Image (cartoon, rainbow, N blue to C red):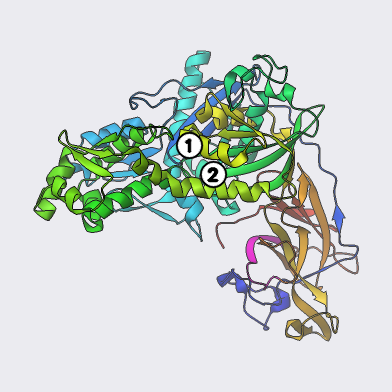
Amino acid sequence: MTEKDPVTDNIRTDPMANPSPAKSTGDPGITPLSPSHTQNEADQVDSTPSFVVVVAIDFGTTSSGYAYAFTKEPECIHTMRRWEGGDPGVSNQKTPTTILLTPDRKFHSFGYAARDFYHDLDPSESKHWLYLEKFKMKLHTTANLSIDTDLHAANGKRVKALDIFAYALAFFKEQALKELSDQTGGDFDNNDVRWVITVPAIWKMPAKQFMREAAYKSGLVCRENPEQLIIALEPEAASIYCRKLRLHQMVDLGTPTNQNGLSPTDNVGSGMNQGDRYVVVDCGGGTVDLTVHQIRLPEGHLKELYKASGGPYGSIGIDYEFEKLLCRIFGQDFIDQFKIKRPAAWVDLMIAFESRKRAAAPDRSNPLNINLPFSFIDYYKKFRGHSVEHALRKSNVDFVKWSSQGMLRMNPDAMNSLFKATIDHIIQHLNELFDKPEVNNIKFLFLVGGFAESPLLQHAVHNMLQGRSRIIIPHDVGLTILKGAVLFGLDPSVIKVRRSPLTYGVGVLNRFVEGKHPLEKLLVKDGTRWCTDVFDTFIAADQSVALGESVKRSYTPAKPSQQVIVIHVYCSEKEGVAFISEPGVRKCGTLRLDVSGTESAAPRREIQTLMQFGDTEIRAMAMDVSTGRTVKASIDFLSH
């Protein structure tokens, strides 16, 4: 930012260059008007749908899909047509999250189509094409995520992450609109669609905003109509769906199906009473997300009891363990080279591993065979000068043997050990969650997401809980989030109370108080002694917020002649924050209100700032009370 806030003129430089931690700046030029703390009641969110259809896109790390429902028939959720291609033994209601760009970086195909086309390319050609898979995790793992963040294709070339996500969303838009047009017998208008995109609840705000930016770029929705897109949190969507499940639609681990006097056609909700608490454990490809909800009757609204938690403990962790095992046997240098020189064969190898991975179970006794592509065997011989069989004998990895049919034979314990680190993380996290005072008397634990199908994971969760709550696994466990996201799009007000993941506030100047404020924060300006860098808290981390609840504060410019009022919004993971310069506090948004050319009759100009919480995204607004001029901002988490 080049311009300085007038109040900080000639004192110190603007901190925007280094937003984390916020530097001491005498920033910004506003001071609270008392009384400053007002909390609004939650606005009534208008949930009457103005859309004809809700389409939800579950953009997963390993697989993706869409589902939809017409607002006239909210109970009837359609999942998309079956995908062409598909793997034996793997349900293809969703398609792999894989994308292929031509050598000149134009979109070519997505999903099975991308994978199959890439696989059939000659190796001399394939190295020029850009193939990407499992790229969603980059949004979770990138510390300073921005619009310019890059991804690496299989051939090592870099591409803009925003382009890839936009291509993928444009693909789903085209598929869904085509299917809707076929259903209704005419061209279906995109303006009649409310879009829902699911993201992990543990994602930080920049990643959620990144998805919204990708949706704008893809043409899914336009910036002028942001309400057409809802960002849904994956475990919340699963939670909404799980409440509606009938008993014949799920597996209850460790208990007979018909119990508690419920017949198989009763839904779980009918077995849930006012105040019942349940945990949803969403186990996906990239992340595991945990949310704790409580039912509030009569409407069956949901209240979040503890802020979403989890981590990068999805099923791709097992793929990484398998890769590490291959490096132990064949050498890291070979595997790195093979991935670059024979990228399509590497994809084949991981597909072969994927179907065997799904066969791993606690009581399995016979070995699992993993096909090695011919080009792996061939390239290894060229690279090392001896055979794959020789490498296995020499490697001291005695639980992986060579089969003469060209397969790696893994004994079940070896396969199960690949799961261990990932499952241990999930169990540790569940233990920590169940130790929290807010998380007691949990009636149900819903295990959802593609990874929830793993018998090894189910077994571990069952052992950890020891009957403390019922473990429920929906039959269509991989589609739970997708269907719940459609229900959420039909009625976003179903989740009434959330927990704020972060502490939010603005930076202000306060009158300096001897003995209370540190001396290094003293700023003398026109004879007035100010304390700089004060964090004026709007909401604290883990505080309950109702849907649409807004917090309003009034400020006045520290210098009456100011022409532009700049209000910086900060956030922190800590609950109690006194100054914006504390470690871990970072700038996450800016409201800029131009008050030039408008005189105010009041002795002190009042600037009202309003922040709205309780939704999956945060909105902010500032108003010059004397003129009614307002400026809105979706808080920008990406550009700082």
Specify whether 583 is left or right of 638.
right
Q: Main secondary structure of the magenta part?
A: strand
Which residue corresponds to mark 2? Answer: 288
For image coordinates 61% across by 20% down, the residue present is 256
Q: Quadrant of the N terminus?
A: bottom right
Mark 2 Cα within 10 Å, few/some/many (few <14, many 20+)?
A: many
In the image shown, does 522 or 323 lie closer to the viewer? 323
Asked whether residue 587 is drawn in magenta, I would say yes
Q: Nearer the viewer, residue 359 or 152?
A: 359
Question: Relative to residue 179, is residue 584 drawn left or right?
Answer: right
Given the image, on which type of amino acid does mark 2 rest?
Val
Q: Is residue 163 magenta?
A: no
For mark 1, give the secondary structure: helix
Residue in the picture at 72% in, 48% down: 499
Secondary structure beneath label 2: strand
Type of amino acid under label 1: Phe
Residue 215 visible in rendering: yes
Labels 1 & 2 near each other (Cβ < 8 A)? yes
Q: Which residues, given as a range, are shown in magenta?
A: 580-594
Q: Quadrant of residue 82?
A: top left
Residue 557, percent from left and from top? 80, 69
The x and y percentages for residue 177 are 49, 25
Q: Residues within 10 Å of mark 1 (few under 14, many from 20)?
A: many
Depth check: give the residue in front, 574 or 437.
Answer: 437
Residue 284 — which label?
Answer: none
Residue identifier under label 1 = 451
